[in-house]
């Protein structure tokens, strides 16, 4: 769990008190230091802050924003990936409280198996609380096991299996990391931009997708965008020597 915590951040806004409006992953690919999140989170970039130094300092990351353009609406966007290529000041500030996931821990070209368990680690808004008298902001991460759905479901949710990963979410029976038991899960607003992980053990973590959508048409499903979209975007944009995705090609 600590390995996921070191690389995972949440974004708050500065309007009418703190509120989590998205999650993110800190990643280093070649000489690039990045925040990976959902594109719709970065649509509100001017409002975003990250808490660092144990929540005592509110920091606004800076750098180059990279995200897919809206075609019709974000709700119908099948990719929804946002990247911040951090400037040197932002990289240095974030390293005081977090660490960057190395590119060797990013998995692409993955055959998703229904028999494999994957884990989501993000920050729902409903699991955060500001204590005004103490001037503190308390956040509990959501760590939950999720199983992939059959490929036959993708069309009904307007997604592609080579771009996305769709998983189950049973709100009435989720893993409570604190009590180590099953209980009612949270509303998932705020986890957009968090990671979907394959855990070989609790330190050897592999990122396979960025979670982007909790669809209104089916609240028992959650949708991620494959990490291949990130690596292919960066490979093309910055001419990086990265493994090429065999699932699709970007123009």
Image (cartoon, grey):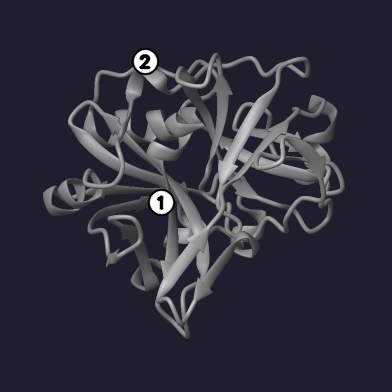
> Can residue 251 be spotted in the picture?
no
Q: Is residue 55 left or right of residue 19?
A: left
For label 1, the SS is: strand
Quarter of the view holding residue 45: bottom left
Q: Residue at 56% across / 48% down in the picture? A: 141
List the residue tagged with mark 2.
243
Which of the two labelled residues, at mark 2 and mark 1, occupies the earlier sequence position?
A: 1
Foreground residue, 42 or 202? 202
Q: Are marks 2 and 1 in contact (CB under 8 Å)?
A: no
Q: Residue at 21% across / 46% down in the picture? A: 96
Q: Specify the quadrant that holds the C terminus.
A: top left
Q: Residue at 26% across / 46% down in the picture? A: 85
> Can residue 133 be spotted in the picture?
yes
List the residue tagged with mark 1.
67
Q: Residue at 71% across / 41% down in the picture? A: 179
| Residue 197 at x, y percent in the picture | 56, 28
| Residue 201 at x, y percent in the picture | 53, 16
Q: Is residue 167 left or right of residue 78?
A: right
For label 2, the SS is: loop
Q: Residues within 10 Å of mark 2 (few under 14, many from 20)?
A: few
| Residue 113 at x, y percent in the picture | 72, 16
Foreground residue, 228 or 60? 60
Q: Is residue 241 left or right of residue 125?
A: left
């Amino acid at each position: 769990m600590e390995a996921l915590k070191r690389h995972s951040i949440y974004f708050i806004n500065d309007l009418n008190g703190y509120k989590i409006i998205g999650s993110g992953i800190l990643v280093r690919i070649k000489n690039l230091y990045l925040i990976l999140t959902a594109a719709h989170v970065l649509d509100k970039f001017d409002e975003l802050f990250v808490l660092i130094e144990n929540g005592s300092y509110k920091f606004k990351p800076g750098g180059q924003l990279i995200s897919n353009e809206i075609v019709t609406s974000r709700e119908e966007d099948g990719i929804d990936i946002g990247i911040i290529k951090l400037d040197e000041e932002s990289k240095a500030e974030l390293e005081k409280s977090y660490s960057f996931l190395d590119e060797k821990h990013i998995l692409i070209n993955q055959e998703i198996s229904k028999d494999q368990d994957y884990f989501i680690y993000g920050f729902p808004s409903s699991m955060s609380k500001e204590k005004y008298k103490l001037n503190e902001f308390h956040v509990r991460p959501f760590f939950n096991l999720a199983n992939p759905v059959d490929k036959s479901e993708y069309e009904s949710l307007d997604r592609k299996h080579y771009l996305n990963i769709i998983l189950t979410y049973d709100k009435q029976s989720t893993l409570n990391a604190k009590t180590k038991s099953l209980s009612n899960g949270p509303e998932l607003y705020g986890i957009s931009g968090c990671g979907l992980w394959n855990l070989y053990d609790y330190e050897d973590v592999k990122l396979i997708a960025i979670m982007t959508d909790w669809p209104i048409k089916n609240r028992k499903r959650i949708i991620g965008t494959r990490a291949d979209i990130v690596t292919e975007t960066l490979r093309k944009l910055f001419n990086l020597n990265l493994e090429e995705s065999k699932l699709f090609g970007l123009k």
